Image: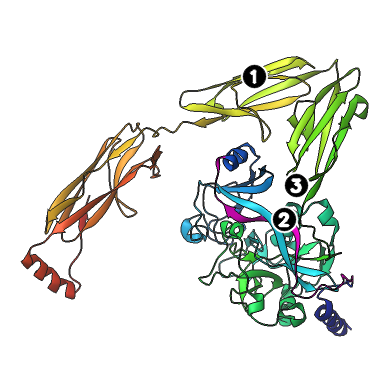
Amino acid sequence: MKRTLCILLSLMLAVTGLVGLGVSAGATNVGDIILFGNYPQTKVSETTALKNAANAATWNSYGYYTGNGIYDGNMTASDFMKYADFVSGGVKYRAVKFTKYRPNFTNQASIADSSYQDENGYSPNTTYYFKYEPLKWRVLNPSSCLVMCETIIDAQAYQNVVRRESASDIYYYYIGSTSTFANNYAESSIRAWLNNDFYNTAFNNTQKANIRNTTISNDAYPSEHSLYSSVWTTDPIFLLSYDEVRQSIYGFSNLESKKAKGTDYATCQGLHVEVSGFSGWRLRTAGEYSGMTRFVQYHGGTVDDENVARTCLGIRPACCLSDLTSDTSQNSYTVTATANPTAGGTVTGGGVYSDGQSATLTATNNPGYLFSGWYKNGVRVSSNKSYTFTVIEDVTLTAKFSTLSMSYTVTANANPAEGGTVTGGGSYSAGNTATVTATPKSGWHFTGWFEGNNKVSSNASYSFTVTGNVTLTAKFEKDNPTQNATLNVPQAATVGYKSTVNVTATAESVPDGYFVALYDGETQLAKGDNKTVSCAITKMKAGKTLTAKVIDVDGNVQSNADGKLEKDITITVKTGFFDKVKAFFLGLFGLLPKVELKP
C-alpha cells in the first residue's frame, strides 16, 4: 500500500508539482513573467542624500554565522554584517555594510580567501546601497499558480548550524536535534529564512493575502536515500524540488531554461558568480549524504550535491498565488493607530498609504490624562502628539496616555562605561522636564542619546518631557589616535649589483603603543618603535618593493585622514655587462635568487 501511495503521489507531483491545488488564473502561460512584491536588487552609487538617510535609519544585524573550520555545531551568529532600510526621494533603499567578510561556509572563519564578496567587488567598512524593485516571477504552472523568482535574489546556507560526532563520522546533524540530519528541509535554516526574513521583507499584507500556503513533498533523491527524506511541510514560500526542476511542463525543457543570474544584492551577500555570469541555486531536496542537498549548477545541470553549510549558493524562492492576473508589485501599507488606555485619549491618521508616502498621526489626550508618546513594538518613537514618518511597511503605532498623578523613572547609562559619564537620571513627576547630560572622557567622543536602537538626540545635553519610565543610553566612541599621523619613506633608489642597501622609514604624530614596520608583501621584515624602522637588504641582484606601514600591537594597519598608513619603497639594481652574463647563466639553472632579506 505504501508503494502504491508513493506512485500516486509522484503522479500528482508530476502534474501539479504540489498538493491540493487547482485554482485557475485565466490565460497566463508557462514562462510568462509577472511582477509581485519588492526586494533590494540593483546597486546604486552613494549620494549625500542616501548617506544621510542611511545614517538616520535603524541598522539591523543579519546574524550571519562563522565558525572554527570544523563541523562541531559551534557556528556563531554575530553582528559583523548589517543592513538598514530607508526611503530617500520617495524611493525605498537598503544600505549594507560589513566589518569582515562573510565566509563561504558557516563553519569557516571570516577571511577574504574564504568569501566571494571581495571577488564581487565588495569590501569591509564600506556602505553599499541597493534599490528596492519589483520582483519578477516566472509562471511554472498556470493552473496551480505556481511561480518562481526569475533571478537569484539572495545567497544563503541551507543549514546554518551543523555538527558531526567526529572527523571520521559520515553523518552530519542539525544541532537542534541529535537525530535530525543536516539536510532535513523541515528543520532547515533556509525554510525559516524564506518564511520570515524574505516573506516579511518582500511582501505587504495585501500581497501576503495573495500567497497560498502550499503543502510540498520533501523526499530525498534518489529514492534509495530515503533515510534523508523529511516530513512534508506547508508554507507560503519554499524552494523547488529536484523533481520539479526536471518537469518540461514547467518550462524546464533544457539546461538553458534552468540557468540563472544573480542581482547586485545577491552578489553583495557573497553569491558565487562563474565567469559566464551565471550562478548555481539551491533546491530543497536532500541528496546522497546527510550534509548535502541537490542544487542547479550554473550551467543548468541538476546532478550534483552541495554542502548544506555553504553560503554562496543562490536562492530562487517559489510560491503559489491565488491570482496571477493583477500586478501587485506596487506596495501599499496599512498604518494602524491605537490608544492605550482607550480612556486616555483619541488618535487619528491611520489608514492605507503608498510605499514612501508620508503619514501623520495625531493624539489628543482626554482630561485627567497626559500623552506619553507614540510607541512601536514597545519602543517610543516620538514624544510629540503629532508624529510624521515615511511609510515603508505595515505598522501599528500606539499612543500611550498616563494619569497626571503618576511619577516615572528616568535611567541614564553610558555605553561603553569607560567612554564617559552621564547625569540626570532619577524619579520625575509626569509632565516634568528631565535633562540628561553626557560628558566624554579624554580620548573619547559622544555620538548620541539612544532609547533602544532609536537615536533621540545628538546633543550631549538632552531635555524632554517625562511621560513614562524611560531608559536612555549615551553612546561614546573612541577617538582615532592616528588620525593626524604621517608616514615618510625614502625615494625610489638604484643600487649596484649584489650590493647592500639600508632602508629606513619614519613617521610623525604616532602615539605610543603603535609601531612603524617594514613588509615584504605580507611578511614583516622589521618592526621599530613609533618613530622609525630600519632594514638591511643584502646581495641585491634584482628589483624589490618594500612597504612601510603604521600598525598597532596586533599588526592592524592604521588609518589617517588620507587612508591607510602604508607606503611603498621601490629599489632597482644597476648591473654591469659581466654581472648580466653571470646572472643569465645562473638563471638558466635556477640558481639565481632575487633578493636575500636580513631584517
Which colour scheme appears in the figure?
rainbow
Q: Is residue 263 above or below residue 249?
A: above
Residue positioned most to the right: 343
Q: Label 2's element? A: strand
Q: Is residue 347 above or below residue 88?
A: above
| Quarter-of-image position of residue 565 | top left
x%, y% of residue 125? 50, 46
Q: Which residue is mark 2?
A: 38
| Quarter-of-image position of residue 172 | bottom right
- Mark before the other along the chain sequence, 1 or 3: 3
Q: Label 1's element? A: strand
Highlighted magenta segment, given as a residue range: 23-48
Q: Residues within 10 Å of mark 2 (few under 14, many from 20)?
A: many
- State the separation of the CA atoms marked 2 and 1: 41 Å
> What number of labels is visible?
3
Q: Which residue is mark 3?
A: 355
Q: Label 3's element? A: loop
Q: Residue 436, labelled with which disc? A: 1
Mark 3 or mark 2: which is in front? 3
The N terminus lies in which quarter of the figure? bottom right
Residue type (three-letter) at the residue carrying disc 2? Asn
